[in-house]
Amino acid sequence: MELAKKARSVSSRRKLAPRQKGKLPGKSALSRMQILDAAAQLFRRQGYSDTTLRQIAKAAGMQAGSIYYHFGSKDEIVDEVLATGMKDIYKLVEKTVASSGEESGYRERIERGMVAHLDLLLTKGDYFSSNIRLYGQIPEALRPKHLHLRQRYGRLWDQILREAQEAGEIRRDVKIVPLRMFILGALNWTMEWFDPHRYSVGDFARHINAVVFDGIKVDGKKDVAEVEWPAALRGPRSR
Amino acid sequence: MELAKKARSVSSRRKLAPRQKGKLPGKSALSRMQILDAAAQLFRRQGYSDTTLRQIAKAAGMQAGSIYYHFGSKDEIVDEVLATGMKDIYKLVEKTVASSGEESGYRERIERGMVAHLDLLLTKGDYFSSNIRLYGQIPEALRPKHLHLRQRYGRLWDQILREAQEAGEIRRDVKIVPLRMFILGALNWTMEWFDPHRYSVGDFARHINAVVFDGIKVDGKKDVAEVEWPAALRGPRSR
Amino acid sequence: MELAKKARSVSSRRKLAPRQKGKLPGKSALSRMQILDAAAQLFRRQGYSDTTLRQIAKAAGMQAGSIYYHFGSKDEIVDEVLATGMKDIYKLVEKTVASSGEESGYRERIERGMVAHLDLLLTKGDYFSSNIRLYGQIPEALRPKHLHLRQRYGRLWDQILREAQEAGEIRRDVKIVPLRMFILGALNWTMEWFDPHRYSVGDFARHINAVVFDGIKVDGKKDVAEVEWPAALRGPRSR
Amino acid sequence: MELAKKARSVSSRRKLAPRQKGKLPGKSALSRMQILDAAAQLFRRQGYSDTTLRQIAKAAGMQAGSIYYHFGSKDEIVDEVLATGMKDIYKLVEKTVASSGEESGYRERIERGMVAHLDLLLTKGDYFSSNIRLYGQIPEALRPKHLHLRQRYGRLWDQILREAQEAGEIRRDVKIVPLRMFILGALNWTMEWFDPHRYSVGDFARHINAVVFDGIKVDGKKDVAEVEWPAALRGPRSR
DNA sequence: GATGAATGAGCGTTCATTCAT
DNA sequence: GATGAATGAACGCTCATTCAT
C-alpha cells in the first residue's frame, strides 16, 4: 500500500534494466522487484524472523502465495536482498572514491567514502541496511556466502587505507585491518541511533574523520571539528 | 543442563546476595536466576524472536510452563535481562574509572573503561551483550525504558570525557556527544565480528585508544599502536 | 466426536495396559491413544495424504496443535499406526494357529488363520487395515522399516504352510512363497470390495480354502463350497 | 522430458487414431494424449493426491495452466485415465480369450487371460494400473461410474468362468463370483509387490492357474507347478 | 493453444500462553 | 513451585484453479 508508493531504495531502480535497452520491465520483473523492495524495507525495520511473508506480500500488493511464483523460499528472498545490498555499497564506495580524482588527497577521499557508506545505510539503502542488520540473524546456510561478500567490501576499504598509508597520509605504524574494523564498526552502529532527519550525515562523517585523522589529544593543533553541530547532538541526548 | 553448570555471567552472581548476608538463595530465587541466565545466554546468541521459552526452560532445567510462575511473559524476561545488563555495565565502568584513582591520567582511565566495556560485552556478560544486541528487536512497548537506561550509560561516558576535556587532555573543539557515540559504536559493533578466543580485548582497546587520542595522520608523532597485533588481525581477514 | 465414542479397534484396547497393573491409563496415554485410533480410522478410509492433522485432531477431540504434544510429526503417527497394525496381525495369527492345537489338521489351521486375517482387516483392525492400505503411500523414509515387518509376517505364513507341506497336507511340488503371496494377496484385496455387513468373512475364507486345497477342476471330488453364498455374492454384482 | 520420450503405454497409441485414417493427430489431440500419458504414469506411481498438476504438466512438456485448455479439472483427467484403463483391459482380455480359439481348453484360455491381466497391470499399462491403484482414492463423485466399469470387467471374467463350468472344466459346486473375486484380487495385489524385472509374469500366472485348478492338497496328482521358479521367489523374501 | 502470473484455501508445524493438578 | 497437557493464532509453504494476453 503505502510502501509500494514510496521512493524505491537504491537497488530496485537498477533492477529494471536487464530486460532490454529502453524497454519497460516485464510484469514479472516488476513484481519481483516489488517483493524485494518490500522485503528489504521490512527486514531493515523488523529483522528476519519478525518479518512474515504475509507482510511482505501485503507491502508488495499481492497474496502470500504469489511470492512463491518469484522465489522459492523466504531464505531465497533474504539471500538476494543481502547480496544486492552488499553489491550496492561496494559499487558506490568504489565509484565515490575513484571519482574523487587526483586533485584530492586520501583524507578527503576517505571522508567521501564514509559519507557514501552512511548515506546508503541511513537514508537510501534498505538493501544495504538489511545486510548490515540481518547478517547475524539469517539461517546458517546462507552465512558463508554473505561473509564472503562482506570480506570483499572490507578489502576494498583496506585497499584505500593502505594506499593512503603508502602515500604518506597515514602513519606507518597504524595497522590497517583493525583500523578499518574500528571505523566501519562505528559507521554501521549508527543504524542503531542515528536519525538522519535530525542530524546531517555529512557532518557526522566529517567529525569522525577529523577525530580519526587528527586525534583528540591536545597538541597545539586546533583544526578538529570546526563543524557546528546541531543542538540535538550537542546536548545530553544519547542512546 | 550444560548451561546451568557453566560459570554464570556477571549478573547472576550478584542476584543471590539480596536475600540475606550469608544465606543461600531460596529455591524460587534460584530458579528465577537460572531462567534469567539461560535467557541471557540464548538471547545473546540467537536474538529475541529466535529464542523460545522452551529453549530457555530446558537450559534452566525446567518445563516451559514453570517459567510463568516466575515471570508473567517472555517480555518480562527480556525486560529484566536487558535492564540488568545495562546496570551491570554502568556499575562496572563507573567503578573501573573511579578506581583508576588520581595517579593515572584520563587517557588511561578511558582506556580502562573501554577494556571493561569490551570485556563484559565479549567475554563475561550475557546480560549486557543481550542488551546491546536485542534493543532493536524487543517489542515497542519496552523500548522507552531501555532507551532511558542506555542514555544514562551514555551520560556516564560523556561525564568522563568532559572531565578529560576540562583537565586538558582532550581538545576543546571536540564535541563530546558525537565522540562518545563514535567510540561506543565501534566498541559495540565488535559483537558482530570480534572473536575473543583469537584476539586480545586489551590490545584492541589500546589500539583504538591510540587512534582516537593521537589520530592516524603523519605529523612527527610515532607512538600509535606500538602494540604488536596477532597475525590473525593483521592479515586480510575481515568481516 | 462420533469417532471417539465408537468401539475402539483392536490395538487401542491393549495400549492401556503399560501403566500399571489394574490402573487406569494416564491422561496423556489416553490422548495418545485417541489420536492413534482416530488416525488409524481416517487413514484406513482416506489414505495418508488425504487425511489431515486437523481431521485427526477433531476426531480425537482436540486441537491440531495439541497433537504435537504427543507426536513429533504426522510421519510419527503413521509409523506407529502401521507398526501396531502389523504387530496385531502377527500376534493374532500366531495365536490363532497355535491354539488350533493338535486335534486339527493344517487345512483347518490355515483356514482359521485366513479368518483371523480377514476379520482383523475387515471388521476389527483400523491399524492393520491402515497398514495394508497405506504401505505404498507413506514417505520413503518409513518404508524399509515397514517392509521388514511385512516380511516377518510373510515368514510366519511361510512357516505354517511349510509345516503343512512337511506334514503331507500340501503337495511337495507346490512352491510356498508364491503360494503365500497369492493367498495373502487375495485376502488383502478384499479391502477393496468386501463389505462385511453384507457377506460373511468366515464363508469367504472357507470358500477360498476349499478352492486352494481342492482346486476347481472336475475330478470326482465334490466337496468344494457346499457353503451357501448370500444372494448378493452370487449375483452379477461385483467390483 | 524423459517421460515424454518413453514408450507410451497401451492406451495412448490408440488415441491417435480417431482423427482420420492415416492422418496424424492434431496438435491438440497430441497434447491431450501427452497429458493423459504423463498423468497415468504419475498416478500409478504416486497415487492421486500426491500427483500434482505441475508434475503432470512438466512430464507432458507444458505449463500447468495449459492443462486447463484440455481438461476442466484434475478430476476430469483421472476420470479419463481410469476409464481408459478399464476399457484397455476389457478389450485385451476379451480379445485374448477369444483368439485362443477352439483348439484350446478353458483352462488354457483362463491362463492366457490371467497373463494378459498381469502383463497390462505390471508392464504395459499405466492407465489400467492407475485404475487398479486409484479407485479407492478418487473423489466420491467419480466412483459410481468407475465401479460400473469394474463390474463390467468382472462380468467378462464371470462369463468365461461360467462357460468353463458349463463345458465341464470347473466343478459345478464352485461359485463363480467369489472365485473371480479371489483370482482377480490375487492378480491385482501383485501391483504391491511383484517386480516384473525379477520374476516372470507368465510363470506366476501358470503357477496360480495350477493351484486354482488342481488345488494344493495331496491326492495322487503331481502336476502342479512343474514350473521352475527363479531363486528369488523361492527364498524367504516376501512382502 | 498455451503461457505467465496470480489467487486463496488449506496444509503440517511452532510457540507463547493457560490452567488444573 | 512446578508440571503436564492443551490451546489457538500464526507461520512458511503448496497446489488446484483462474484468466488476461
Image: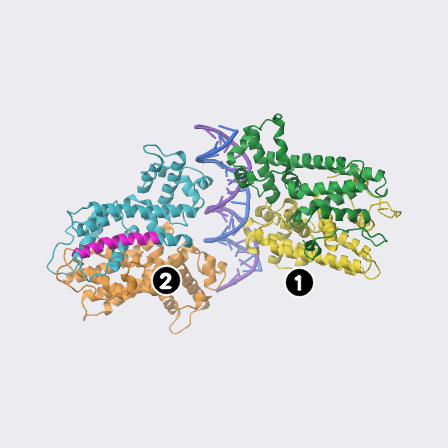
Chain colours: A yellow, B green, C cyan, D orange, E purple, F blue
Q: Secondary structure at mark 2?
A: helix
Q: Nearer the viewer, residue C104 or D35?
A: C104
**Dot 1: chain letter:** A
C151 inside magenta stretch: yes
The residue at the point 76 percent across, 55 percent down is: A113
In the picture of the structure, the residue carrying the numbered disc 2 is: D126
C22 sits left or right of B198 in the view: left
Point out residue A225 in the picture as x, y percentages from the top left corner: 84, 46
Label 1 packing within 10 angstroms: few (<14), some (14-19), many (20+): few
Q: Residue D233, how many percent across, how many down?
A: 28, 62
Where does the image place residue C25, in percent across and percent down from the top left? Answer: 36, 34
For this orientation, the residue located farthest to the front is: B103
Quadrant position of residue B107: top right
Dot label at residue C238? none
**Number of the label disc, if any, that sits on residue A23:** 1
Q: Which residues are magenta?
A: C148-168
